[in-house]
Each structure stands twice: as structure tokens, then as C-alpha cells.
């Protein structure tokens, strides 16, 4: 069913040529507002603001929903679709007369600029014939009046452009008849008055022409207090002197051919509003605009879309060349061939096209020196390919698309194009597959676009497959895409394929001497499941020096096969990662893959072991040595910074190692994470790693590894408040240490059991386990372990009401538990707690501040947060409220930075007069 909407006169809508009546002013207004943006989303907020205006109420959104529902009942199904955040009128723009008018006017101007006056005249007449009266005349809302005035101004400009064309064609008699009433209706517009004067003069009516001038002058002086402008005054003088230049020019026998080579605009072009405006603005002021980005991101579609919109501004036409820089199966277009295309487009052919490349470049520059030409150099390989193809004229503009940034081009503006956002990606899918199907399965639609990574090419392929299979549910395609091993196969349809586009860039690297290392590195990077890649880890994978690995990564970035994510860090787009994994399977033998992966995993094992020794030198874990040197960390601070930067990578390689055939590496990574992560409060991330380490160690009879993993998991569960599970794992750790023949290593497990029983209020069991831990530590003269146990006994004593004993015990712990900032800060925090419970608040407050300084320097975030909260409580009890708020704020900010609280949770805590203890530290001594 064909729908036509008329806005250029009395409002009308027709279905298959038959008028349809809409009841209600707001229904008309909503449909009109959508029609003005046909094919594009209009937000609910904008519709409410425009249609309801000053009378907007809290129910306006609901009223809008009702109005849209009524419109859907009246009109064809699917005409008005719901999109994220608003609505879209799914109607070709040419079926709205206002858009059709703009389109026809643009085509007319292009035909005029191509020296095709007959075609231009016909198009101008068709455009103007669409007008039936004042645009949007029945709508009084401010937005409608603004649109009405804008459309009327466009009509006047088109009318006057048509008159200019007719005057140039010698139709001055007809112009007089059509133009006189226009001038009378718009007495202050100088352009049509000048046109009427010229037409009258050419029609042998000079006196009438001068009378028109005098009438205009009188109106301008009376209403504006101004004399006519320069154009009218000069024209009056020319008429008085019978200047020969006023006579019509002799029509040329044949005009030059003006190129119009743009490919068709993409009907499904979606969003990109900021990028479109950037490119339009760049072409207003600069000679060259470069749009770069990875394959499939929509560079060509953007360039062609904007070029269609601006083509009418370039009187000498639009030239388009596909340079095949990344076209599957084709070699990049040589510069001489590209020059030949450009010269033929400008009217040369055969022997007129110089065979010598330098002569061809010179001829091209000469031809374009005074031109107003738009040149689209699509799919460029590099700067050397496009530099000779940039036209010389100041009136020319060039748009270049490439996977490379082409930053060496002089005086060019650059736009790096990324994938579509979530909403725009779903909108694009809806425009191809059908809005109804997307509305019916919004979650599946979101999953499809997410699995396509926001790449327009991938989304277009997914939409095309859905359109070709109306029997499929969107969830069917989502399930196919979710299978990573077959996703690139699924993203192939007809002549479109994501894999082929990626492969072109990879092949170019293979063919370039400077790209060999990058081509080799790509499949190696596919072996490692890390979200990002660093030069150090890549060097380990490849067995190269770090500088060579860094150069390869940078070359992959230039080729748009990697994206930068900070200094010295890169990542794959998800689809390119799948391609890299495929290439690893095809290009590398099983032995090569296993060896490279082991080198990569051992790079992380070595470095995490170093980080553990630096942040917590006293830890004793089973020795899981690494075959790689790892990163040379200079101290505890650098170790903490490396852990923070590599957190997601460490979790990824630990998970990957657990699924490999190398249990020692997997167990070593899981245990190595514990202390660096614990310092930063990331214990939640450790549970799965430790559970897997326990399973692997038990399967391979590694009692020591199992014992340490059981002990660490008990620690994690303790801090999460999962006390029964924690006790079970710690007791299993005690048993495993015995089976490993290392009974002295049970100190930590007994110590943690004592902490848990203290927190549970089962103080008798707490005393038993802490005594066991202390006995083992003293037996082996482990001063650090003795201090740690004494520190925890102080917590037990003040909970028993033995405050002075608790203070005394804590002082001994301060003296004994030394050797690290962590221990010194923690023991002073315990002493402060003992003072606080003994109501010696001033001493507690001072001691808390000393503890906070030490813990801050140690980088022990979670301990710092606990101590800051208790310090705030103490200061508040002393009436030092500003200082209390400061420490509470520090506590919450620390937890926010550790991603253990959200900003909303922090704000809620800070609104409380005396904040409650945050959940992440609620299960700690």
C-alpha cells in the first residue's frame, strides 16, 4: 500500500491515491513531525516538546503513546515503528512532498551545473508544482511555523533559480508574466526584482524595467530607510546606458560533459549525525578530508552519503574512484590507472591522456586548477597512492577513505570512524531486516548487533540474511552468531563477507617487506585470550625482543587490524580476533601453537610472581617457576600499577591456562594472583581461579598446590562473609598440608580460622585456632607470622572485654609484626581499634592516622578503607565531625576506585549523618 504525505499546502495524506482523514490536531502534528524526518528516528522527548510545547504535562509521554497507537490503527501496519528512545516513520522520503521538493530541486541544480538546461527546467517545474499553498499552514505550533518559514524560503530560492535558468535560455517573455506577481508579493527581495528588470529590458520594455526599479526603491526607502543594493543600482545604470552585456548570450552548441559518478546512496544509511556534520563542515573549509577506520565500519557509505548531499555545490561535477586498497581479490589501483580514470572523467581520452605518469599528473593539476570539482578517492591503500590524485584548484574538494590514517597528507582534516552505538546498530538492523521483527525480539536484536561489534558491514550481512529468511526468528541468527567458531561463516551472504575484508589487510602485510612481522604476529595474538595486548606479552608469544614486537603491534594498528587502548596497549575488534584465531589454526602447526601459548602464559606467570614478592615479600607459595623472564618490575608501587593495568588480562590468562594441558602453569597463575589482587580489594575475582586450581591440583596429586589454593579460597570466602564455606576450605587446607608433608605451612590456615571464629563470635574456637597458629610460628621462629597472629589475638581480646590486655597484645604485635608497610599499618590499625573499644578515643584517633599513612603508602586498599571507616567513627564520637567526614569520604572513594562501590552507593552513604559500614568491608576485622 502506497502512502503519500503532503505538507506543501493544506495538510493531506493518501493511501493508494485515496485521501485519508485524520481526526485530532495532535495526530496531524505528530505525523507531520515524523514526516519531516521520514526514515530517521525522532526522540520521544523531541515529539513531546514540539507537539505538546508549553502545555507539556507529566502525562504527555502517555498521550503521545496513545496518539501513535491511533495513527497506527488508521494507517498501514509498520509505517510508524518504535525505536530506542522514540519513533520512526518508515517511509521513503520521496513520498513526503517536502522531501521530494528538496530532492527535485537539488537534481535540477545539478543538471543546470552540468549544462543541461532542458533537464534542469523540467526538474525545477516538477519541484515547484508540488506546492499547493502555504506549507504546514494548518499547524500553529512554534516548530511548525519555523518549518513553514524554512520551506517557504526554499521555495522562493528555487523559484528564483528557475527564473535565472529561463532568462539564460532566452525565455524573457514568459519570465515577465510569471515573475511580476512574485515581485509584487515580495517587494523587498532584490534578486527577483533584478530578474524582472532584466526580462523587461530584453523584451524591449526598458521604460517598464526602470519603473520596476523606481517602485522597488520607493518601497525600500519607505519601509527600510535604505537605498537599493549595488546589484539593482548597477542594473539600472546598465539599462540607462544600454550596456551590451544585458543582451542574452548566444546559446552554446554543446556544453562540456560534467561528471556525476557517485555510486547510489545507501538507502539504509543510519545515524552518523555527528560524523555527517563533521564531513560537511570539513568540506566547507578544507581541501581534503580523510575518513579512516577498520574494514566494514562504513567509511565509503559515509563519504558517498555526504557527497550526494553536497554534489549540487560543485559546478564541474563529482568524480569517484575506487582505489581498491582493501578490495578482496583485487590489487590496489596503480596511480597511472587512477589518473587515467580521472582525466577521462574530465573529458580527455585516447592519446590525449599522457602515457608518462609525471605528465599525466601535470595535466590533471592543470585541468583542475580553476575547477569546482568534488573528488571521492575511496578505499585508498596509503598516502603515496592518493597524493598525486588530489586536485589542484582551491575550489575543489577531496574526500579520501582508507583503513590507514594517512597522517602524512598536508593540510588534510582527519576523522577516525568507529562502530555504531547500540541504539544506532539496532536501528540499522531494523531498516534492513524489518522494524516489526526487531520490535518483536528486541533482546535478540541487541545480541545480534553486539556480536557484530557495531560494524555496519556485519550488521548489513545479518540483516540481509534475515530478510532472505522470513521463517527465521532473530534468536535463530543470534544463536548462530554466538558460536564463535562459525561466526565469520555466518557473517557471509551473497557478495558480502566480513572475513574477506579482514583478509585483505592481512595479505597486504604479507606482501610488504615492512609488514612481515605484523603478519606473523596477527595469528600469534589470536592464541592468547587476553582482552588487550602489550609489547612485552607479544614479545614472549613470538620469541622476539620487545622493540620488535612493539613495531609489529604498531604496524597492525596502522593497518586497522588492532585498536590502540592507551599507551603501549592494543586490542582486537571481536570479529578480527576470530579471524586471528582462524589464521593461527591454519598457519601454525600444533607444536608451534602450544609453544607460543606457553611462552605467553609464562610471561604472565613470571611477572605475577614478581609482583607478589614485591607487594608481600613474606608470602610462601609452592614454587611454580616460569620459563620466561616477565616484566622487570622495579618496586611495590610499579607492581601495583602493573597489576591494575593487567587485571583483565591476568584473569583471562588464568582462565585460559586452567583449560590447557599445563596444570602447573594454571595453578601458579591462580596462586600468584592472590596477594596483588587482595591488596586492591579484588577478592571476588579470585574465587573461580582458586576453585579451578584446587580441582587441577587434586587431579594431579599436587597436595601443596591444593593446600595453598584451599587456604586462599578460605581467605576469599572469609572476606565475602561466606563463613561456613571458608571454614570447610581452610580445614581441607590443614589436611592437605599434612598430606604434602609440610605441616608447618598450616600457620596461615589456622590463623584464618581464628579470624573467622572471632567474626562469628565463637571466641573459644577463635582462641584454639590462633593458639595453634602461634605455636607453629614460634616453633619455626617465623617473626612475621608471630606478629600476624598476635595482631589477630588483640581483636579477640577486646571482643572478650579484656581491653587492657588487647592494647598490650597489639603493642607487642606492632613491635613484632614488621618488615612491610602492610604489616606495620595493619598492626597500628589493630592497636587503634583496641584503644577505641577501651574508650581511649584520643589515642585511637591519633593511632588511626598513623595506620592510614602506612596503609596508603603500602597500597593496601581494602585495609585502608576499613581503617578509614573506623577512624571516621572514632573522630565522630570525639565531636570532630569534619575530620570524620573526611575519613569516611576517603573510605568510600577508595572502594569506588577499586570498583567495589558504585557512585550512586557512595553518594547514598555520604548522605547519611553517620554512614553505615559499606558491604565490601563488612566481613573484615
Image: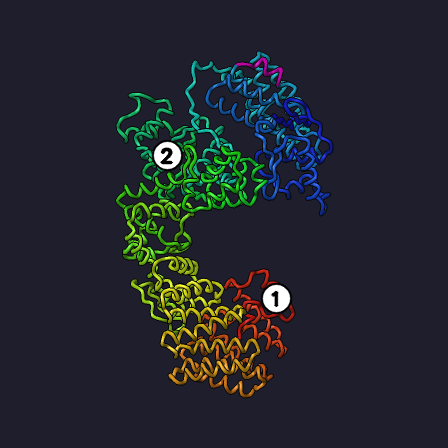
Q: Looking at the image, which residue is at 48% across and 68% down?
A: 716
Given this view, does label 2 or label 1 mark the residue nearer the observer? 1
Q: Looking at the image, which residue is at 44% across and 83% down?
A: 774
User: Is 32 rendered above or below residue 857?
Assistant: above
Q: Quarter-wise, where is residue 197 in the image?
A: top right
Specify the label residue 38 is tagged with.
Answer: none
Residue 423 is situated, as x and y percent measured from the top left of the image, at: 54, 44
Foreground pick, 898 / 231: 898
Instruction: Report the magenta residues as a range.
Output: 170-178
Residue 358 is situated, as x and y percent measured from the top left of the image, at: 28, 31
Left or right position of 212 against 671: right
Label 1 sits on a secondary structure element that is: helix
Label 2 sits on a secondary structure element that is: loop
Foreground pick, 845 / 368: 845
User: Is 564 rendered above or below residue 389?
Assistant: below
Left or right position of 162 against 345: right
Per the image, the residue denoted by label 2 is 390
Per the image, the residue denoted by label 1 is 910
Q: Classify the position of the N terminus by image quarter.
A: top right
User: Which colouring convention does the figure follow?
Assistant: rainbow
Label 2 with label 1: CB-CB less than 8 Å? no
Is residue 171 covered in magenta? Answer: yes
Q: Quarter-wise, where is residue 798 in the image?
A: bottom right
Foreground pick, 874 / 1: 1
Amino acid at each position: 500500500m502506497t502512502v503519500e504525505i503532503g505538507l506543501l499546502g493544506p495538510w493531506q495524506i493518501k493511501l493508494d491515491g485515496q485521501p485519508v482523514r485524520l481526526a485530532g490536531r495532535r495526530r496531524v502534528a505528530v505525523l507531520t513531525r515524523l514526516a519531516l524526518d521520514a526514515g530517521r528516528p525522532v526522540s520521544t522527548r523531541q515529539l513531546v516538546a514540539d507537539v505538546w510545547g508549553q502545555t507539556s504535562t507529566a502525562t504527555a509521554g502517555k498521550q503521545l503513546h496513545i496518539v501513535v497507537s491511533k495513527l497506527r490503527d488508521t494507517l498501514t501496519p509498520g509505517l510508524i515503528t518504535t525505536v530506542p528512545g522514540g519513533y520512526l516513520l518508515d517511509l521513503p522520503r520521496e513520498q513526503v512532498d517536502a522531501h521530494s521538493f528538496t530532492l527535485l530541486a537539488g537534481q535540477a541544480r545539478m543538471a543546470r551545473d552540468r549544462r543541461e538546461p532542458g533537464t534542469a527546467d523540467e526538474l525545477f517545474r516538477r519541484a515547484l508544482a508540488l506546492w499547493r499553498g502555504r506549507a504546514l499552514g494548518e499547524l500553529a505550533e512554534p516548530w511548525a511555523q519555523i518549518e513553514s518559514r524554512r520551506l517557504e524560503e526554499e521555495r522562493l530560492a528555487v523559484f528564483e533559480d528557475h527564473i535565472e535558468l529561463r532568462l539564460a535560455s532566452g525565455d524573457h517573455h514568459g519570465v515577465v508574466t510569471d515573475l511580476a506577481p512574485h515581485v509584487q508579493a515580495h517587494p523587498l527581495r532584490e534578486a527577483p526584482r533584478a530578474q524582472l528588470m532584466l526580462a523587461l529590458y530584453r523584451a524591449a520594455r526598458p521604460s517598464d524595467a526602470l519603473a520596476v526599479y523606481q517602485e522597488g526603491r520607493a518601497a525600500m526607502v519607505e519601509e527600510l530607510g535604505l537605498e537599493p543594493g549595488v546589484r539593482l543600482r548597477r542594473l539600472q545604470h546598465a539599462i540607462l546606458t544600454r550596456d551590451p552585456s544585458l543582451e542574452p548570450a548566444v546559446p552554446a552548441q554543446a556544453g562540456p560533459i560534467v561528471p556525476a559518478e557517485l555510486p547510489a546512496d545507501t538507502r539504509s544509511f543510519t545515524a552518523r549525525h555527528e560524523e555527517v556534520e563533521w564531513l560537511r563542515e570539513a568540506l566547507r573549509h578544507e581541501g581534503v578530508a580523510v575518513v579512516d577506520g577498520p574494514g566494514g565500519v562504513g567509511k565509503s557509505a559515509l563519504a558517498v552519503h555526504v557527497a550526494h548531499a553536497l554534489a549540487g555545490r560543485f559546478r564541474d561535477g563529482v568524480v569517484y574512484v575506487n582505489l581498491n586498497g582493501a578490495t578482496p581479490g583485487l590489487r590496489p589501483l596503480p596511480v597511472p590507472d587512477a589518473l587515467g580514470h580521472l582525466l577521462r572523467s574530465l573529458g580527455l581520452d585516447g592519446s590525449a591522456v599522457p602515457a608518462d605518469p609525471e605528465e599525466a599528473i601535470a595535466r590533471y593539476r592543470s585541468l583542475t586548477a580553476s575547477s569546482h570539482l568534488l573528488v571521492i578517492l575511496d578505499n585508498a591503500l596509503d598516502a603515496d597512492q592518493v597524493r598525486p590524485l588530489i586536485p589542484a584548484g582551491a575550489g575543489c574538494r577531496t574526500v579520501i577513505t582508507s583503513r590507514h590514517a594517512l597522517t602524512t597528507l598536508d593540510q588534510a582534516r582527519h576523522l577516525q570512524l568507529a562502530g555504531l552505538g547500540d541504539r544506532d546498530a539496532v536501528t540499522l538492523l531494523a531498516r534492513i531486516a524489518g522494524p516489526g521483527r526487531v520490535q518483536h525480539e528486541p533482546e535478540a536484536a541487541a545480541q545480534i548487533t553486539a556480536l557484530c561489534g557495531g560494524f555496519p558491514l556485519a550488521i548489513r550481512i545479518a540483516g540481509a540474511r534475515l530478510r532472505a529468511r522470513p521463517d527465521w526468528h532473530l534468536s535463530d541468527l543470534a544463536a548462530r552468531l554466538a558460536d564463535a567458531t562459525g561466526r565469520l561463516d555466518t557473517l557471509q551472504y551473497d557478495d558480502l563477507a566480513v572475513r574477506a575484508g579482514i583478509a585483505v589487510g592481512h595479505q597486504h602485510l604479507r606482501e610488504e617487506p615492512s609488514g612481515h612481522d605484523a603478519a606473523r604476529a596477527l595469528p600469534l595474538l589470536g592464541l592468547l585470550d587476553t582482552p588487550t595486548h602489550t609489547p612485552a606479552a607479544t614479545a614472549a608469544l613470538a620469541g622476539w625482543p620487545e622493540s620488535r614486537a612493539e613495531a609489529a603491534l604498531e604496524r597492525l594498528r596502522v593497518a586497522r587490524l588492532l585498536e590502540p587502548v592507551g599507551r603501549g596497549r592494543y586490542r582486537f575488534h571481536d570479529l578480527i580476533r576470530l579471524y586471528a584465531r582462524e589464521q593461527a589454526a591454519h598457519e601454525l602447526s600444533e607444536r608451534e601453537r602450544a609453544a607460543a601459548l606457553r611462552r605467553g602464559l609464562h610471561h604472565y606467570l613470571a611477572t605475577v610472581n614478581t609482583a607478589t614478592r614485591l607487594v608481600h615479600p613474606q608470602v610462601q607459595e609452592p614454587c611454580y617457576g616460569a620459563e620466561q623472564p616477565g616484566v622487570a618490575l622495579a618496586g611495590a608501587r610499579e607492581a601495583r600499577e602493573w597489576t591494575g593495568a593487567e587485571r583483565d588480562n591476568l584473569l583471562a590468562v588464568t582462565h585460559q591456562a586452567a583449560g590447557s594441558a599445563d596444570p602447573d602453569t594454571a595453578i601458579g597463575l591462580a596462586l600468584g594472583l592472590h596477594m596483588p589482587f587482595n591488596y586492591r580489594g579484588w577478592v571476588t575475582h579470585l574465587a573461580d581461579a582458586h576453585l579451578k586450581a584446587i580441582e587441577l591440583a587434586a587431579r594431579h596429586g599436587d597436595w601443596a598446590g591444593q593446600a595453598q589454593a584451599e587456604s586462599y579460597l578460605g581467605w576469599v570466602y572469609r572476606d565475602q562473609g561466606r563463613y561456613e564455606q571458608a571454614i570447610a576450605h581452610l580445614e581441607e587446607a590443614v589436611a592437605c598440608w599434612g598430606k604434602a608433608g609440610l605441616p608447618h605451612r598450616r600457620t596461615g590456615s589456622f590463623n584464618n580460622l581464628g579470624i573467622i571464629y572471632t567474626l562469628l563470635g565463637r571466641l573459644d574456637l577463635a582462641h584454639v585456632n590462633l593458639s595453634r597458629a602461634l605455636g607453629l610460628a614460634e616453633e619455626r621462629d617465623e617473626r612475621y607470622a608471630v606478629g600476624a597472629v598476635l595482631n589477630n589475638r588483640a581483636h579477640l581480646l577486646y571482643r572478650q572485654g579484656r581491653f587492657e590486655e588487647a592494647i598490650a597484645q597489639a603493642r607487642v604485635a606492632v613491635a613484632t609484626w614488621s618488615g612491610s608497610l602492610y604489616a606495620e599499618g595493619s598492626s597500628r590499625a589493630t592497636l587503634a581499634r583496641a584503644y577505641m573499644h577501651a574508650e581511649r578515643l584520643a589515642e585511637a584517633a591519633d593511632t588511626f592516622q598513623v595506620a592510614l599513612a602506612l596503609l596508603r603508602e603500602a597500597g593496601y586498599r581494602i585495609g585502608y578503607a576499613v581503617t578509614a571507616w573506623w577512624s571516621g567513627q572514632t573522630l565522630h564520637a570525639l565531636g570532630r565531625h569534619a575530620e570524620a567526614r573526611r575519613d569516611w569520604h576517603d573510605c568510600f572513594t577508595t572502594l569506588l576506585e577499586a570498583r567495589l562501590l558504585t557512585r550512586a552507593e557512595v553518594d547514598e552513604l555520604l548522605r547519611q549523618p553517620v554512614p553505615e559500614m559499606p558491604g565490601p568491608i563488612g566481613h573484615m576485622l
